[in-house]
Image (spheres, rainbow, N blue to C red):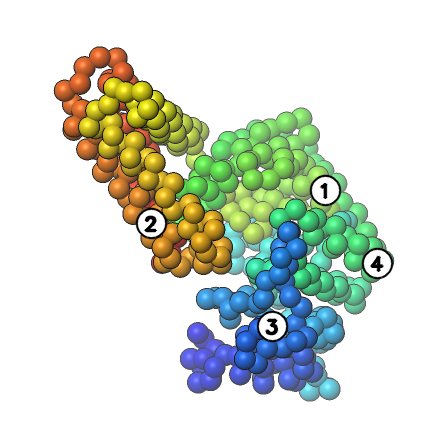
Amino acid sequence: MVVEAVTGERYEAWLDRAFLTPLGMRDSTFGFVTQTGPGADPRLAMGHFDDGSTQAAIPWFTRPAGQFTTSAADMARLAQFLMGDGMIDGVPFIASDLLRTMGRQTGTAAARAGLPIGYALGLQIRDRHGVVGLCHSGNIVGYRAMLCLYPDQGKAFFISVNADSETASYPALDAILIRALSLPPVTPLPTAADPERAKWQGIYTPLPNRFDQFAYLDGLTATVMVMAVPDGLLLTNMQRPDRMLLPLGNGLFRQQDRTIASHVFMEDADGVSFSDGGQSYQRVPAWRFWLGWLSVGAGLLGLGWLLLIGLWRLVLGPRSLGGMVSISALLALMLPAPFLIWGQSFLALGDATVGSVLLAVVTGLLPIALLATLFLDRRRTGLLPWLDRLASLATLQWLTVLAVAGLLPFRLWG
């Protein structure tokens, strides 16, 4: 870590002493704090899940970048400092011009194209509920939090929720706090005629992808379809509701429920792309996207056929050696389920447990079993054997794609 390389100290100790102590944040620490075991802090609220079960704080591998124990009072002190002039008791602590750069992107293509929102140096310009602020959100297992600053009004809010719910509307809590601050609403930027908006139509995939292991899946499910409609552009994808973008001119667009530019479309030597300030998307040929889904569809149909016909023959016959190999490999895919679902905590999904190792083994053996099936049943004739071969080949092509994408064997650890 940079902090430890420069200071020669553990990052927790140095940041606690050099940053938190001068700010008076006495109930905060970068050190790990939990509710159980030696040194447990009874003041720390227990995390919760949707079913009401509790979860103690656990250490993360990337804890320096995302795990910080604090209190609402201390976060109020931090918010006050971040909106100030960088002085503590009249002594410069952080240069005020550096504080003003937080949340202000400058070096990205989106920023150069005029998009005013994005993340920079710990804060993100966030346009929500009719106001624009500088925010930072966070969540770990059992907890969620949001800090938002409104420097022009000298107001801020911080909320920490000891519940990690998949169904709760956390933005509704933000909206309540924003209303309580009585912030003046921002007048939405007026739209502008954009007769060339149709040129932005197409299929876009995340680029760069934040996590290499999810690049293949995101290329299928995080893909955004952009369509020109009378009022602007309509963005659709599988992971979030449709969004209507209203044109502002020069490739800038404002999401219908926002007040300032939320997206920018760009064209350069690398092609056409757009950004929402937090993620960039590159336009790809439509055939590549649909070919990917065709591969998935063929693979799933092949798997379905092999499973159904294999179970039929297993019960009623007639059986073949190759058919028994393939149905055995398919049924083996269910072996890890009891270990993964009931035999371990979901917090151990990233560890090399019995369940995860078994999952890697059975998924790795599946293509080998299908190749063996093709070889063992190569002399069988008739319609059904040919359908079996077609299903095996359809499944194998998809498994090959998964292997090239690094998803086969399917490993949850490492």
Label 4 to label 3: alpha-carbon separation: 32 Å
Q: Which of pointers 3 and 1 indicates the residue nearer the eye?
A: 3
150 relative to 93, above or below: above
- Of residues 391 and 21, the one drawn nearer to the viewer in this rendering: 391
Which image quarter is the N terminus in? bottom left
Q: Earlier in the sequence, mark 2 or mark 3?
A: 3
Which image quarter is the C terminus in? bottom left
Q: Earlier in the sequence, mark 3 or mark 1?
A: 3
Label 2 to label 3: alpha-carbon separation: 33 Å
Q: Amino acid at mark 3?
A: Gln
The residue that mark 1 highlights is 257
Asked if the residues shown at circle 1 and circle 2 are in contact, with their CB atoms under 8 angstroms apart, the answer is no
Q: Position of residue 273 (x, y in %)?
A: 50, 41
The residue that mark 3 highlights is 35
Q: Residue 358, labelled with which disc?
A: 2
Residue at the far top in the pictured view: 382
Q: Earlier in the sequence, mark 4 or mark 2?
A: 4
